[in-house]
Amino acid sequence: MIDNKLKDKDGFETMYLNMGPQHPSTHGVLRLGLVLDGEVIVSAEPDIGYLHRGMEKLAEHRTYQANIAMSDRFDYVTSMNNNFVVALAIEKLLGVEIPKRAHYLRILMAELNRVVNHILLFGFFAMDLGATTALIFGFREREEVLDLFESVTGARLTYNYFRVGGVARDLPEDFIQKTGAFIKLMRKRIKDYDDLVTNNVIFRDRSVGIGKISKEDILAYSLSGPVMRASGIKYDIRKDDTYSVYKEFDFNIPTREDGDCFDRYLLRMLELRESLKIIEQVLVKLEPGEIMAKVPKVIKPPAGEAYIRTESPKGELSVYLVSDGTVNPYRFHLRAPSFINLQILQKILPGVKVADVIAILGSIDIVLGEVDR
């Protein structure tokens, strides 16, 4: 616990401030215990667990396919990416090779969900700093993608689309045409985003030079994803430890060097453009074919273990899965990027002003469902 009787440099008592767990800008039920010297933070302690549901333990009492459905609830903003990693881990245990079309459909959905995540980051991060219009813009484009997801899965948030051996159903007839139209629209809207926020002098004043994270701290705290790449470390699991058929696609790994709030924001905007490139390539490569491999009706992998790493929109999302030969996993563990990336707050918040806490937290991009599980 933080000592709320810390003295400042002049010997005066500091003030202890609870930020959350109901604060609207903590992006969920996160509590930050802050010790303040005036407006300046002396020490900070993230307090998590308010949303803990024991999901990893629950997984040991559910079938393998049911755990794919439950994974929707980890990071509920990027449900497709959660489905992806759990399905890959189960298939590794089973030794199943899925059809090529199923690979393409999975990557299509995962990259569309990455677009949704980064659109929401744009809207919520800007809103945290006072730019309400940005959130309206972000939700407008998000609705376009959710319409696409709904046409395939019947759902708009928790999709349960992936299956052990492939995907639940094929695309509707007009899906490719509508996705192509969305890509054209999104490229035009990104320019609007830049005009409204990226080049806005007030937004830059609130984000440039704020909350810098060094390369050394990135490595020491095992941070990953956009937070890592914004500090100049060029590493993306889709390319550097590739999975599925990502190696077939041509895309860049953007990086920035300053590691501040602005670079973390800008990196997401650059990644959004790369995801649109991947989606375009998937639409070209899609050919008719099977969407499911032949797998048993009752999934019962042989005894063994599997570890799968993926690049979710927030960072490295990995699953460690142990089978004892029964219909339920013996052990299920999730390596969640939101949980790992959140740790850095204790290092970088001391010395900054209270108003900058919101900018720093928003730029890290966390979802408490994934932190607490």
Image: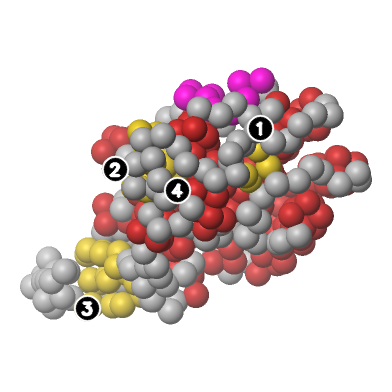
**Start-end of magenta stretch:** 239-248
Looking at this rendering, what residue extends furthest in the left direction?
Answer: 11
* Mark 4 residue type: Val
Question: Mark 2 or mark 1, which is nearer the start of the sequence?
Answer: 2
CA gap between label 3 and label 1 equals 60 Å
Q: Which residue is mark 3?
A: 15
Q: Which residue is mark 4?
A: 327
* Residue at the spot 60% in from the left edge and 36% down from the top edge: 295
Q: Secondary structure at mark 1?
A: loop
Question: Mark 1 or mark 4, which is nearer the start of the sequence?
Answer: 1
Circles 3 and 1, Cβ within 8 Å, touching? The answer is: no
Q: Nearer the viewer, mark 1 or mark 2?
A: 1
CA gap between label 3 and label 2 equals 28 Å
Which is more toward the observer, 107 or 5?
107
* Mark 3 residue type: Met
Q: Quadrant of the C terminus?
A: bottom left
Q: Which residue is mark 1?
A: 293
Q: Nearer the viewer, mark 4 or mark 1?
A: 4
Q: Secondary structure at mark 4?
A: loop
Where in the figure is residue 191, as x and y percent of width and height? 76, 46
Which is more toward the observer, 224 or 96?
96
Question: Mark 2 or mark 4, which is nearer the start of the sequence?
Answer: 2
Where in the figure is residue 48, as x and y percent of width and height? 32, 66
Q: How many marks?
A: 4
CA gap between label 3 and label 4 equals 53 Å
Question: Mark 4 or mark 3, which is nearer the start of the sequence?
Answer: 3
